[in-house]
Amino acid sequence: MSMLKATLPSLAFLRSRWLGCPLALMLTSTWALAQDKRWGPGEAASDYGYRFHDLFWLITILVSVAFALVVILLAIPVLRDRERPGHRASFDHGKSLHDKRLTAVISIVIFIILDAWVLVIAMQDLREAHWALPDAEDPQTYRVEVLAQQWAWNFRAPGVDGEFGTADDIITINELVVPKDRPVSFNMSSKDVIHALFLPEMRMKMDVNPGSINKTWFRPITAGDFTILCAELCGFAHYQMSGKLRVLEQGLFNEWEAEASKLASTAFDADDTEAQWAWDWEK
Amino acid sequence: MTSDHIHPEPTTFLKKHVFSVDHKVIAKQFLWFGLVWLGIGGIMAMMLRWQLANPGVPVPLFGKLLFPRTSGVIDPASYNTLFTMHGTIMIFLGLTPAMIGALGNWSIPLMIGARDMIFPTLNMLSFWTMVMGGAVGFYSLFVPLGATEAGWTGYPTLSTTVGGVGQGETLWAIAVFLIGASSIMGGINYITTVIRLRCPGMNWMRLPLTVWGLFLTSILNVLFIPVIGSAMILLVLDRVFGTTFYVPASIMSGGTGGDPILYQHLFWIFGHPEVYILILPAWGVVCDLLSFFARKPAFGYRTSVGAMVAVTVLSAVVYGHHMFTTGLSAMLGESFMLLTMIISVPAEVLFFNWLHTLWKGNLRLTTPMLFAMSVIFVFGLGGLTGIYLATIGTDIFLHDTYFVVGHFHLTMAASALFGTFAAVYFWFPKMFGRMMSERLGKLHFWLSFVPLVIVFCIMFISGYAGMPRRYYDHTSTEYLRPLQHLNVATSVAAFLLGAAQLIFVYNFIKSRWWGEPAPQNPWEVGTLDWTTETPVPYYNFKTIPVVQCGPHEFSNPVLGPDTDWIYQTEKLPG
């Protein structure tokens, strides 16, 4: 073995500051390329997610066509109208009524195709989904209060009695368990700075502000483990403020909820005022 | 009125080169100042890209010097400081002086036929206030209790004492205030100069579009910088004197409170016009340069002016699209979505006019022309991706991801930067009396343009894949780890982009002192700045010129077959 080592070229240059670092970059690149790669956000796990994707691809098609047109109209003069002996530019100020009309018509047509179309669909989506907060009185609605802090997510669910601020409230940190196929409604606030609850697989995001309560909702349609991230800069550990979202089938969820509520009642300490942060559900 | 606006030529070195009131010297000061800061901000971007591609690997070459406590590794707090200062520096200390300070000071008096700005001393004060702002901002990096970490947007309550960011935050706010004051002084000066000092015959419809862009930018500066100034004062009061403008009562120990969202409104009322503050001069330059180098009149001069005026007005009423996820009411959200969509109409008019200007031209693909044309490409890409972010339905997911980073870098950063490069390559011969190397210029263009487009297009993919911005390390979360290959690819392209700027630095410095002497009018352009000799005499024009025609009379048939251009001071034959 030692003979073999002696015949190999010295690897000491790896430790040199000048060569070692570009090498580190190359090595990490190889490592990154060898990994499991992802090019998109993955399958959507909420019904709103499908709306997002429909809208996203509609815009992508429209925008691609528009951009292709710009590039073609840029490329043709570059290829065709280059300066050469005997060639002269056409003289046109573009101030005739015809030119002005053409400008106006083209801009309005592009506006209607590109912007107005997207706008109408987006409005429809928003009114049917994003802004159509589920009825809090409806027993189907699963309500969660979120209290964000540097750097953790505190979740409070009402437990089996369906009321916040009681002994059987289920309190979890950095982990949220919700039932599948039921609207999950959030009332969110922050203890310190602005955070943003970001559930990438649900395509949902909403800022969590101190001093006021923000409301949002989503409906998970796939059971499984998902991601909770913070999307608003909240200090140096911002990137670590992540958690787990577990979506359970209704039956499993009921078992989990009963168990968790029971445990919560057992562990409830009325003197621990720090833990009593629930507020009345704001409609 | 214009002819008696004269101040005597200074004789001492200090008055001539340092505390000069001459707009040409101030323009050069702004240019050097801006370029140095663009370099510093660029190096910061390189460090950010290094950390993102190689989380936890020491920064090569100078890492140990900058981060001695972590033996060269960027720690999370320093990472936050770096992207905060990268944004602040690039916007306020890089592009603002290079684009508005240098370009405005250089071209406004020369292009409208004036001997200087109307308020020369205010002009000098504007520069030195910006230097002070830069100094305070730079010093904020070294205060003992930590530098700013709250992002260039500086949202409270993170930026107040609640958030636990470094004490440098206070100095950061003061620096932004000072730079804002400098911009207001510049803005007042530009507006008044354009209104009062146009030479005889230079009516509004004969102004070069560069001047129009700068004029409208100055209006936005004067109207909206005071808003961020007041936001910064309130922030300093909150941080230093314990007031609670931005701190809500619920997280106070007693007393009444304010609202952190107030800051976001104040910030974005300024922040969105700021995008147009940076882009309008670039648009003006593009409008002019496309016409100059296509040897064809700027198509639809009046509609271009109209579109820029419309953008100026509309820019004030779209800012809410930065706040779609803050819990804006449905009514406000939908209104801002609609208004944001409407602002795309004037942009479409400009694109139409630009492309029409090139159509059937006689294109001279010089370096300034390449940069001007690339603005169409880059701004097109950035503007169109804005539709995803203007639409609340898609913005909810894309907000605060790398999609946004790619979008605003293409629109306000890359377009303004390429506009600045176009302007620098174009006016360099007049400014320094020497030619820049065209060969190196074109090399610089291609090696900047291609990596730049790659960098920000990959960011669109990362953003669509759900990668949040302002994350120190994307490999620490299971969901984001499979996106690391995108980070690595972005960083490799970003390093190429950074390295390409060294070509510009070399070309700029070499041409500044050792370049070929420039003729009076190397580009064969008719605007007033090229009628005066090179180097420009102290009073710009021996006699105030009289303008006889518009700035874009290229290839006019009445000029005959031998020439395709005419000075603005000459009368069109026939």
Image: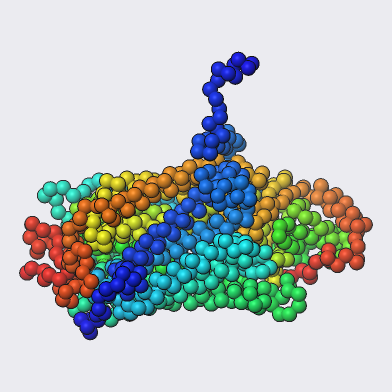
Q: Quadrant of residue A35?
A: top right
The picture places residue A215, in percent across and down from the top left corner, at: 68, 65
The picture places residue B390, in percent across and down from the top left corner, at: 50, 62
Task: Kindly give the residue lying farthest to the right in the view shown.
Answer: A266
The foreground one among B556 and B169 is B169
Residue drawn at x 32%, y 77% as measured from the top left? B120
The foreground one among B394 and A129 is B394
Residue drawn at x 33%, y 64% as measured from the top left? B28
The reply, left or right, for residue B409 in relation to residue A90 is right
Residue drawn at x 22%, y 47% as measured from the top left? A80
The picture places residue B99, in percent across and down from the top left corner, at: 37, 64
The foreground one among A26 and B362 is A26
Task: Kindly give the residue lying farthest to the bottom in the view shown.
Answer: B1
Quadrant of the image containing the N terminus of chain B: bottom left
Task: Kindly give the residue lying farthest to the front in the view shown.
Answer: B12
The reply, left or right, for residue B117 in relation to residue A12 is left
The foreground one among B482 and B214 is B214
Q: Is residue A188 above or below residue B238?
A: above
The picture places residue A109, in percent across and down from the top left corner, at: 37, 61
* Residue B203 visible in this rendered orientation of the protein: no
> How many numbered discs sit on the rendered protein?
0
Scheme of colours in the image: rainbow
* Residue B501 visible in this rendered orientation of the protein: yes
Q: Is residue B206 above or below residue B94?
A: below
Quadrant of the image containing the C terminus of chain B: bottom left
Residue drawn at x 48%, y 73% as measured from the top left? B178
Q: Quadrant of residue B190?
A: bottom left
